[in-house]
Image (cartoon, rainbow, N blue to C red):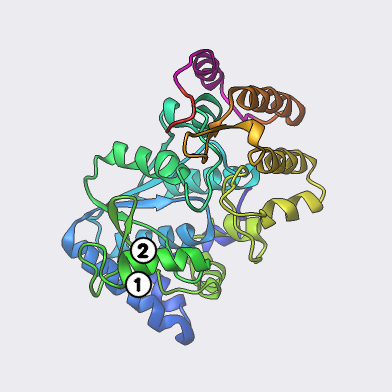
């Protein structure tokens, strides 16, 4: 994951605007204007980094703003869900290590509370895998750890964009573009799980992001090449390997088809859970007839298969502390049909 030294020699983030071509300059300037307005509101910035292309573009922009306004207290926070696709996790950590070493930003990596991890909630407490109508993962695994670290002190800035998916566009329109979030104005804010976050690149298209990373972004900060290489300039989306919010994980499927045997095994495990969660015998049934938590027997089977998967892939999929808590919860009768 090393960046060639000749690329680093050409880095000059203060010259970022001069690297931008005319076709993209209007959108670029809009984002800079939003960031200027944010600077005038609060100089303590919490930039949320996910390891993906959009948040990488946001980090480049925020580092440029730091050269314009050195008094910005720039905090780049990565919420490690411990469920990321392995390739993405490697790139995210490499990128952050380079940023922390070379640029004036406070890089922080946060993790979900042990009682909020994906496996403790699903296997230990019986939460069904997240879906569009019950997306419990994002607030618990990503948002809560970052808010806890910063105690909501400062401006939270995110790389959310319109056009990523129809469902996300609907959420964004309802939370911000109609003025739903506090202070939605000439600068753009989105209400995300109870907190207003700024979204300076919300009007960028995927093509805009790719142009920015591959041309001006790469010339300003060579480490953006890590993310470009990860995606290979494709439409793939990298996230959690167990993501069940989408019906089919095209990224996992593509990686498996490329010959990655470990990802193939992860994909098979995910698809097994997707099928098994729908079976009546694997769910508690509520008094009103609706499906409730995952049954105890099913959760025990998930744990057994997960430990076997961890052994076969030699990947760190679940921690010893998580296993201890899960086994304790499975022995109790606390978690039945109700949430």
**Residue 64: numbered disc:** 2
Which picture quadrant has residue 300? top right
Reading the image, the residue beneath label 1 is 31
On the image, the x and y values in percent for residue 6 come to 59, 60
Q: Nearer the viewer, residue 220 or 193?
A: 193
Q: Which residues are magenta?
A: 316-334
Which quadrant of the figure contains the C terminus?
top left
* Residue 327 belongs to the span the image colors magenta: yes
On the image, the x and y values in percent for residue 3 come to 60, 53
Q: Is residue 45 above or below residue 219?
A: above
Name which residue lies at 56% across and 51% down: 245
What type of secondary structure mainly makes up the magenta span? helix
Q: Is residue 219 visible?
A: no
Q: Is residue 82 visible?
A: yes
Q: Residue furthest left?
A: 41
Q: Nearer the viewer, residue 309 or 124?
A: 124
* Residue 248 belongs to the span the image colors magenta: no
Q: Is residue 312 above or below residue 329?
A: below
Is residue 249 shown left or right of residue 290?
A: right
């Amino acid at each position: 994951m090393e960046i060639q030294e000749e690329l680093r020699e050409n880095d000059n983030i203060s010259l970022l605007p001069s690297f931008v071509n005319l076709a993209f300059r209007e959108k670029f300037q809009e984002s800079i204007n939003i960031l200027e307005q944010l600077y005038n509101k609060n100089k303590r910035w919490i930039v949320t980094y996910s390891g993906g292309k959009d948040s990488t573009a946001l980090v480049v922009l925020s580092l440029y703003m730091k050269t314009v306004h050195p008094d910005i207290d720039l905090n780049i926070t990565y919420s490690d869900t411990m469920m990321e696709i392995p390739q993405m996790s490697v790139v995210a950590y490499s990128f952050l290590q380079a940023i922390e070493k070379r640029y004036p930003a406070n890089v922080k990596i946060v993790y979900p509370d042990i009682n909020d991890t994906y496996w403790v909630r699903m296997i230990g407490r019986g939460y069904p895998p997240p879906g569009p109508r019950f997306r419990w993962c994002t607030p618990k695994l990503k948002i809560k750890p970052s808010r806890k670290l910063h105690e909501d002190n400062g401006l939270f800035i995110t790389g959310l964009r319109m056009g990523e998916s129809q469902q996300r566009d609907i959420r964004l329109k309802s939370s911000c573009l109609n003025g739903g979030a506090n202070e939605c104005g000439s600068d753009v804010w989105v209400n995300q799980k109870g907190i207003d976050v700024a979204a300076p690149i919300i009007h960028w298209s995927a093509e805009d992001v790719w142009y920015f990373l591959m041309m001006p972004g790469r010339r300003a900060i060579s480490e953006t090449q890590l993310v470009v290489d990860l995606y290979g300039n494709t439409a793939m989306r990298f996230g959690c390997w167990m993501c069940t919010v989408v019906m089919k994980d095209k990224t996992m499927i593509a990686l498996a088809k490329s010959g990655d045997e470990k990802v193939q095994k992860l994909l098979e495990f995910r698809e097994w859970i997707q099928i098994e969660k729908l079976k009546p015998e694997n769910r508690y049934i509520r008094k009103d007839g609706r499906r409730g938590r995952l049954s105890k027997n099913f959760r025990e089977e998930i744990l057994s298969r997960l430990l076997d998967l961890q052994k076969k892939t030699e990947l760190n999929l679940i921690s010893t502390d998580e296993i201890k808590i899960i086994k304790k919860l499975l022995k109790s009768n606390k978690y039945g049909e109700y949430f």
